[in-house]
Amino acid sequence: MHRLPSPDGTTGTLLACAVDVVGPDPEVALDEFAVDTVVCLMERDDLDRRFPGYVRWLDGAIGGSRAVWAPAPDHGVVPDVEAASLAADVRSRLERGTTVLLHCGAGYGRTGVLAVQVLASGTGCPGGRDLEATLAAVRTARPACGPQSDAQHEQLWRLCGDGIEGPSREGS
């Protein structure tokens, strides 16, 4: 479990982890880390193989304040409009002072991409905050967290950069 930087102007807490922290018993994990909302970025078939009880919990928790299930393919992305909407939803929760836990399988790729989008969105993306500095801040809090594929890198630059692919993919 890692505490990530929270967007400027918010009072909530942004956390990141791998599915193995929350999957075995989501209520225990959420209570242990004082989490208000978990955001699961894994696809159903991948989750069902590992933690079928967690899938049942997510199915029952959707629509409430405890869970957001926004599946994305491993090393992939969802359409830009969905990604931007999810980042805005997470930011809104942080503005209300809640603790939000992001996770995918390992808690690095999809989780890191969303975390960077949430942080960058607070300064009026695109171009409001230096994307490389935002990515570095996330990686300082959770080493290796961030885009793991060209598609993830390019989406970050489309949504939160200056609309181009970006200067570098080194370290991505």
Image (cartoon, helix red, strand yellow):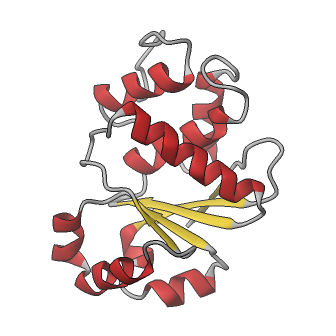
Q: Is residue 70 left or right of residue 166?
A: left
Relative to 34, does residue 72 appear above or below in the rendering? above
Q: Is residue 69 visible?
A: yes
Task: Please report the residue visible at 71 percent of the width from the left and 56 percent of the height from the top.
Answer: 94
Where is residue 71 drawn, in percent x and y? 31, 55
**Residue 59, quarter of the rendered image:** bottom left
Q: Quadrant of the image for the C terminus?
A: top left
Q: Is residue 124 left or right of residue 143?
A: right
Where is residue 37 drawn, in percent x and y? 57, 70
Where is residue 161 drawn, in percent x and y? 55, 18
State the residue in front, 141 or 8. Answer: 8
Q: Is residue 144 left or right of residue 45?
A: right
Task: Please report the residue visible at 49 percent of the width from the left and 12 percent of the height from the top.
Answer: 163
Relative to 117, does residue 141 appear above or below in the rendering? below
Task: Please report the residue visible at 76 percent of the width from the left and 54 percent of the height from the top.
Answer: 95
In this rendering, the count of numbered labels is 0
